[in-house]
Amino acid sequence: GQNIDQPTEMTATEGAIVQINCTYQTSGFNGLFWYQQHAGEAPTFLSYNVLDGLEEKGRFSSFLSRSKGYSYLLLKELQMKDSASYLCAVPHSGGYQKVTFGIGTKLQVIP
Amino acid sequence: NAGVTQTPKFRVLKTGQSMTLLCAQDMNHEYMYWYRQDPGMGLRLIHYSVGEGTTAKGEVPDGYNVSRLKKQNFLLGLESAAPSQTSVYFCASSRASSSYNSPLHFGNGTRLTVT
């Protein structure tokens, strides 16, 4: 089966850097997604990692360690608009893009 | 380009009533999904479809039925609504991929309350 753990809430200051962690257990690893979800809105895709290491995409970076079952999302130069929930998700083995989501980490950015 | 469109946005039902949630996508995606999102539970897969005329059960299928008569549409039905089905429902679509890297594109959600 699939199991995903991430902190439920975090608070960080505008302009700072924040790291949101995700640990996962899966019977077959097929990559890991991060999504952003603003309150009352739909989740939107941020990143996909399948190989170990850090992938940078502007102010957002995502890291993966397959041996440790661990990923993190790094947000730099935080802005107020980054206040949102960040969802970690892993696809099932089976070929049909069935995805298990973590409960999400609600990030509050304060002035 | 509208992406994934869900209707309605809000609905209140009484226990035992039925309704259908509509989802349409204009990205020519092969796969479509229905998720529900509840506080402290995360997104959970209800049913999904890998092509026109095919559907399959997800993690929490009981009390729901689906149909995909056209590639662009995926309908979610509640035959006899229960208070436990109070939730936010998201439709999503993705292209077919053998490498699991195809992201989900979500609709804006339907907030359903069953009293």
Image (cartoon, grey):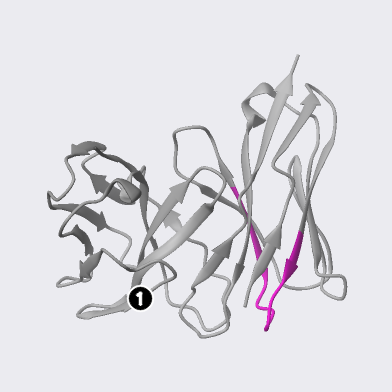
Give the x, y percent position of residue A33.
63, 61
Q: Nearer the viewer, residue A105 or A97?
A: A105
> Which residue is at 19% across, 60% downward?
B77
Image quadrant assignment for residue A62: bottom right
> Which residue is at 61% across, 51% downward?
A103
Give the x, y percent position of residue A96.
45, 79
Judged left or right of residue B90, residue A100 is right
Q: Secondary structure at mark 1?
A: strand
Image quadrant assignment for residue B113: top left
Q: Residue furthest top?
A: A111
Give the x, y percent position of residue B72.
23, 64
Give the x, y percent position of residue B17.
12, 49
Image quadrant assignment for residue A74: top right
Q: Nearer the viewer, residue B9 or A1?
A: A1
> Which residue is at 44% across, 37% downward?
A41
| Residue A41 drawn above or below residue A102 | above
Magenta includes B82? no
> Which residue is at 22% across, 71% downward?
B71
Judged left or right of residue A102, residue B114 is left
| Residue A31 drawn above or below residue A13 | below
Mark 1 chain: B
The span shown in magenta is: A23-35
* Label 1: how many Cα within 10 Å (few below 14, some 14–19, many 20+): some
Q: Nearer the viewer, residue B39 or A61?
A: B39
Q: Which residue is mark 1?
A: B57
Tell me the kind of residue under disc 1.
Answer: Lys
The number of numbered badges drawn on the structure is 1
Judged left or right of residue A62, residue B45 is left
Quadrant placement of the C terminus of chain B: top left
